[in-house]
C-alpha cells in the first residue's frame, strides 16, 4: 500500500523519464508547461488509471504516450524503443466513439487493418479472415449480429463498445482510453467496465485509462496515478491490492470505499488549492 | 385525401392552378400572342414544331453534359488540392473568387475567337460557369474535417493521404452532391447563353431565332424545355444523393 513517488523497475514497458511538455516554443521560453516532471514506469501487461481535475493535462499525457506530441524535455520509451511518432502498437478510444457514419459497424472495426502494416498489404487477400476476427471481437463485447448496422442505428453504449473493438482489432500491445465511458449512463458504464475487464484479462495488453471516475479507476486498475492541476504532475501513485478477478460487488466493500475515499482526498486537495504559479 | 397525399400532389396542383389563371388572363384580356402567349397557344406551337424543338433540346443537353462532366473532374481535383493543402488554399482561393466574379457570358466572344462558332464555346462556357461551386464544396468538406475523426486514424500512424481519402472525401460527399444540384442549373445557363450568340443550334439559338421571327409561343416553349431538362437533372442528382449519402440526412441522432 504505497503512497510514494514513482519507483524504478527494470522491465518497464512504458518508461517516461523526466518528461516536460510545453505547447509551443514561446511557452517553453516562459517556463509555462502543460505537464511537468513526469516519471513513470509501467510494467508489461499492467493496467493503470490516471485521474485528475479537468484541464490538468491528462489528454496531453495521452498524446505524449501515443507519439502525437513530442516532449519538450526528457525521454519516452515504449517497449524498449524511443517514441518518435505515432505508434502502431497501440490502440486508442476516445470519449466520442467517432465511428465513421458511412461505414457499417464491421467496416468501422476493420478500419485499423486498412492502415497499419503488416495487415494493410494483406488486406485484400485476407479480408474474409479479418472480417471473421472482427465479428468475433464484436461478439465478445456483446455486439454479435450487429455487423451490418450503421453507427447511428446503435445506442451510445454500443457505439463505444464498437469503438473499443476498433482499438483492439490490430492486436495492439497497449490500449489507451481517454475517458471512454464519460458520455454513458451509470448502468451502461458498469457493464462496460466488466467488458473491458474481461477483454484485458483474456489478452493482458497494457492499458492506460484516463478518467474522472474514481470508482472506475479503482475497480479496473492495478495502479492509480493522480495528476495535479495544470501544470500537471503526478502527485500520487497508489497500487490497488484488491485481488483479481474483481466483481462489481467489490465496489461496495469497505476496503474499496476506503481507497476511493483516500484518493478523493488527494484530488480534492488539488481542486481546492489556488492555481500554481509557473 | 389525407394530409400526406395532399403534400405530395400539391406542387402539381399549384402548377395546374397557375396555368389555368395564366390562360384565363391571356384570353380574358385579349393579350396579343406576340407579347405574352397563352398556355394553349404555347402547347399548339410546341406540337407543331416538335421535331425542331427536340433537335435543339438534344443539342443543348449533350453539350451541357459534356461541359458539366469536365466541370466535375476539374472541380473535384482542384477542390481536393485546395482542401488538403493550406498553402494551396491561401494561394488559389482569392484568385478563384476573382475569376468567378467575371460574368461568363462576357467570355463567349473570346471563346469564339479561339474555338470558332458551335459546340466548343458552349461546352467551355458551361464548364467555366459550373466548376466553381463543385470546387468550393469539396474544398470546404475537406477543410472542415472534424479533428476527432482525423485523430482516430492519426493514432494508427496513418499518413495524410489516408486521412483524406478514407475520411475526408466520403465525409465531403453530401457537400459534393449539394454542389452538383447548383452546378447543373448553372451549366444549362452557360450553354444557353453561349448558344444565343455563338451557335446555330441549341435552345439558345432557338430562343433568338424564334424571338426575331416573332414566334413567341415557340420561344416560350424552348424556355420551358430547358427548364424541364434542368429540373430533371436536379431531381436525378437529388435521387443519387439520397441513396449514397443517407447517413448524412438524419435529423435527430442516436
Image (spheres, coloured by chain):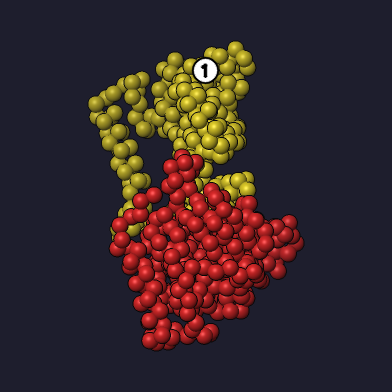
Q: From what the image shows, is residue B169 above or below residue B192?
A: below
Q: Position of residue A227 (x, y in %)?
A: 43, 63
Mark 1 highlights which residue? B107
At 48% from the left and 76% from the top, the residue drawn is: A2
- Given residues A239 and B235, the one toward you in this image is A239
Tell me residue A266's x, y (percent).
37, 69
* Direction top: furthest residue: B113
What residue is drawn where x is 52% and y is 68%? A6
Quarter where residue A90 is shown:
bottom right
- Mark 1 lies on a secondary structure that is helix
Residue A168 can be seen, yes or no: no
Q: Residue at x 72, y 59 (%)?
A: A118
Specify few, some or many for label 1: CA neighbours under 10 Å numbering under 14, 14-19, or 20 or more: some
Chain depicted in yellow: B
Q: Is residue A182 left or right of residue A93?
A: left
Residue B30 visible to an observer of this rendering: yes
Residue B217, position as x, y percentages in the image: 41, 26
The quarter holding residue B30 reads: top left
The chain drawn in red is A
State left or right for residue A64 relative to residue B221: right
Q: Outermost residue toward the left?
A: B29
Task: Read off the chain for label 1.
Answer: B
Amino acid at each position: 500500500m504505497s503512497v510514494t513517488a514513482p519507483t524504478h523497475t527494470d522491465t518497464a514497458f512504458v518508461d517516461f523519464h523526466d518528461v516536460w511538455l510545453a505547447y509551443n516554443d514561446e511557452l517553453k521560453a516562459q517556463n509555462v508547461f502543460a505537464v511537468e516532471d513526469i516519471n513513470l514506469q509501467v510494467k508489461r501487461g499492467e493496467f493503470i488509471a490516471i485521474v485528475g481535475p479537468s484541464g490538468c493535462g491528462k489528454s496531453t499525457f495521452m498524446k505524449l504516450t501515443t507519439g502525437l506530441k513530442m516532449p519538450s524535455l526528457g525521454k519516452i520509451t515504449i517497449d524498449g524503443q524511443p517514441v518518435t511518432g505515432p505508434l502502431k502498437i497501440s490502440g486508442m478510444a476516445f470519449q466520442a466513439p467517432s465511428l465513421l457514419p458511412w461505414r457499417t459497424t464491421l467496416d468501422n472495426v476493420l478500419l485499423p487493418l486498412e492502415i497499419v502494416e503488416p495487415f494493410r498489404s494483406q488486406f485484400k487477400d485476407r479480408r474474409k479472415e479479418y472480417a471473421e476476427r472482427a465479428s468475433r471481437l464484436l461478439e465478445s463485447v456483446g455486439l454479435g449480429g450487429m455487423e451490418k448496422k450503421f453507427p447511428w442505428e446503435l445506442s451510445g453504449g454500443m457505439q463505444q463498445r464498437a469503438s473499443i473493438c476498433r482499438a483492439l482489432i490490430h492486436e495492439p500491445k497497449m490500449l489507451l482510453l481517454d475517458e471512454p465511458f464519460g458520455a454513458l449512463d451509470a448502468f451502461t458504464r458498469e457493464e462496460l467496465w466488466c467488458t473491458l475487464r474481461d477483454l484485458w484479462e483474456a489478452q493482458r495488453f497494457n492499458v492506460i485509462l484516463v478518467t474522472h471516475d474514481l470508482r472506475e479507476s479503482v475497480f479496473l486498475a492495478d495502479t492509480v496515478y493522480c495528476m495535479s492541476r495544470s501544470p500537471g504532475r503526478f502527485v500520487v501513485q497508489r497500487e490497488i491490492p484488491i485481488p483479481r478477478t474483481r466483481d462489481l460487488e467489490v465496489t461496495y466493500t469497505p476496503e474499496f470505499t476506503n481507497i476511493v475515499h483516500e484518493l478523493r482526498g488527494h484530488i480534492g486537495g488539488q481542486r481546492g488549492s489556488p492555481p500554481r504559479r509557473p | 385525401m389525407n394530409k400526406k397525399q395532399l403534400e405530395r400532389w400539391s406542387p402539381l396542383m399549384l402548377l395546374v392552378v397557375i396555368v389555368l389563371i395564366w390562360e384565363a388572363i391571356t384570353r380574358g384580356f385579349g393579350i396579343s400572342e406576340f407579347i405574352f402567349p397563352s398556355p394553349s397557344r404555347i402547347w399548339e406551337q410546341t406540337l407543331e414544331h416538335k421535331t425542331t424543338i427536340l433537335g435543339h433540346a438534344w443539342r443543348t443537353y449533350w453539350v451541357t453534359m459534356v461541359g458539366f462532366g469536365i466541370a466535375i473532374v476539374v472541380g473535384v481535383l482542384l477542390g481536393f488540392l485546395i482542401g488538403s493543402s493550406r498553402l494551396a488554399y491561401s494561394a488559389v482561393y482569392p484568385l478563384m473568387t476573382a475569376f468567378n466574379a467575371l460574368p461568363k457570358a462576357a467570355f463567349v466572344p473570346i471563346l469564339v475567337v479561339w474555338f470558332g462558332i458551335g459546340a466548343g464555346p458552349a461546352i467551355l462556357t458551361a464548364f467555366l460557369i459550373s466548376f466553381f461551386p463543385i470546387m468550393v464544396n469539396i474544398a470546404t468538406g475537406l477543410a472542415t474535417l472534424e479533428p476527432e475523426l482525423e485523430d482516430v486514424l492519426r493514432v494508427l500512424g496513418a499518413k495524410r493521404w489516408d486521412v483524406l481519402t478514407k475520411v475526408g472525401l466520403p465525409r465531403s460527399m453530401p457537400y459534393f452532391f449539394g454542389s452538383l444540384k447548383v452546378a447543373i442549373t448553372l451549366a444549362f445557363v452557360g450553354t444557353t447563353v453561349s448558344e444565343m450568340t455563338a451557335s446555330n443550334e441549341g435552345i439558345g439559338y432557338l430562343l433568338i431565332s424564334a424571338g426575331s421571327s416573332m414566334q413567341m409561343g415557340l420561344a416560350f416553349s424552348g424556355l420551358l424545355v430547358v427548364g424541364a431538362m434542368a429540373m430533371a437533372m436536379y431531381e436525378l442528382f437529388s435521387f443519387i444523393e439520397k441513396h449514397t449519402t443517407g447517413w448524412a440526412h438524419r435529423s435527430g441522432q442516436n
